Image (cartoon, grey):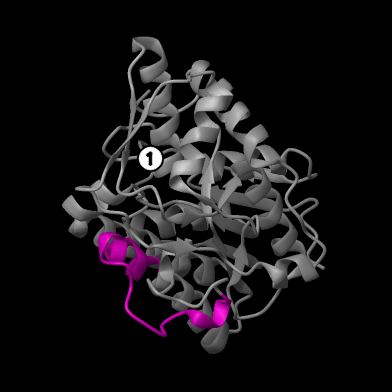
Amino acid sequence: MYDLAGKRVWVAGHNGMVGAAIARRLEQEQCDVLTVDRQTLDLTDQRAVLGWMHNTRPQAVFLAAARVGGIHANATQPVDFLRDNLLIETAIFTGAESVGVEKLLFLGSSCIYPKLAEQPIREEALLTGPLEPTNEWYAIAKIAGIKLAQAYRQQFGCDFISAMPTNLYGPGDNYDPLGSHVLPALIRKVHEAKASGSAVTVWGTGSPLREFLYVDDCADACLHLMKRYSDGLHINVGSGEEISILDLTRLVMEVLGHDGEVLLDPSKPDGTPRKLMDNSRLKAMGWAPQVSLREGVARAYAAFLAGDGRNI
């Protein structure tokens, strides 16, 4: 059991959706939360990160900082996704070992797994097959982060762990029509279709199955792991439930109150046909999500209407 009480805890990436949720959850702990914005510290600059960490001396780190985006962003900016994420990871892992951080949790992504991995996807499926081409640059960077955590644990005895969340959504999400993930993209599409009385166009065939987790549930899972888990194997963080993109579209339309037509655009890519993660290890540690998909979409839409997000 790792006790966060009285500790200096750095949330790297606190302005992002996941980092902000972790910072909110840490308000329930008796700890000193450290944050720094990108104008003050460039997380891709190893020398600057090392200097900042030596000055602030964090004892625990949640590494939620990353360059993220949807299919279009990954396809058109491969250098940015690979280079920037590798630089961020290298800088923070190096600094954490240098200043003697007691515990670090690295946040990855479910896209690390092979495109055609056996479902539900167990942690052991990592590196057993080809990645989904539409986001392989981001996936490779995240795999490198997992391996860095394992390497520091093996070589230096650092208590570094990794959590692999499924598709996340909620307050602070990115609603850029070209750069966002599927759920925030759908919320924006349906919102605009409702305002104009038009149809909702869905990328692809609508058949891919996806799993979603409300971001505050993910934050709670991360604290659960930080307190109770210490091993080299990364841990899946998911809801254990899946839904087709077409059914998800209809759910979002119901929650937002739009009864218009749904059009499919099969000229656009589907991505991985199915992606459900096996979260049995996390469940065995006594954790379960609290927010249903319908309730989560309602909360996310309320945040969207309040302007709590990017590119709204």
Q: Nearer the viewer, residue 190 or 145?
A: 190
Q: In terms of image quadrants, where is residue 162?
A: bottom right
Q: Quadrant of the C terminus?
A: top left
193, 77: nearer the viewer:
193
SS class, disc 1: loop
Main SS type for the magenta part?
Answer: helix
Label 1: how many Cα within 10 Å (few below 14, some 14–19, many 20+)? few
All told, the count of numbered labels is 1
Residue name at image x 48 percent, y 46 percent: 13
Residue 114, given in percent of the width and then of the height, sits at 40, 75
Q: Position of residue 57 (x, y in %)?
A: 59, 56
Determine the image quadrant of residue 199: top left
Q: Is residue 312 visible?
A: yes
The residue wearing badge 1 is 38
Magenta residue span: 122-142
Query: Which of the 4 image quarters holds residue 119?
Result: bottom right
Q: Is residue 101 above or below residue 16?
A: below
Q: Amino acid at mark 1?
A: Arg
- Horizontal side, residue 298 vs residue 149: left or right: right
Q: Quadrant of the N terminus?
A: bottom right
Residue beneath the point at 20% across and 54% down = 75
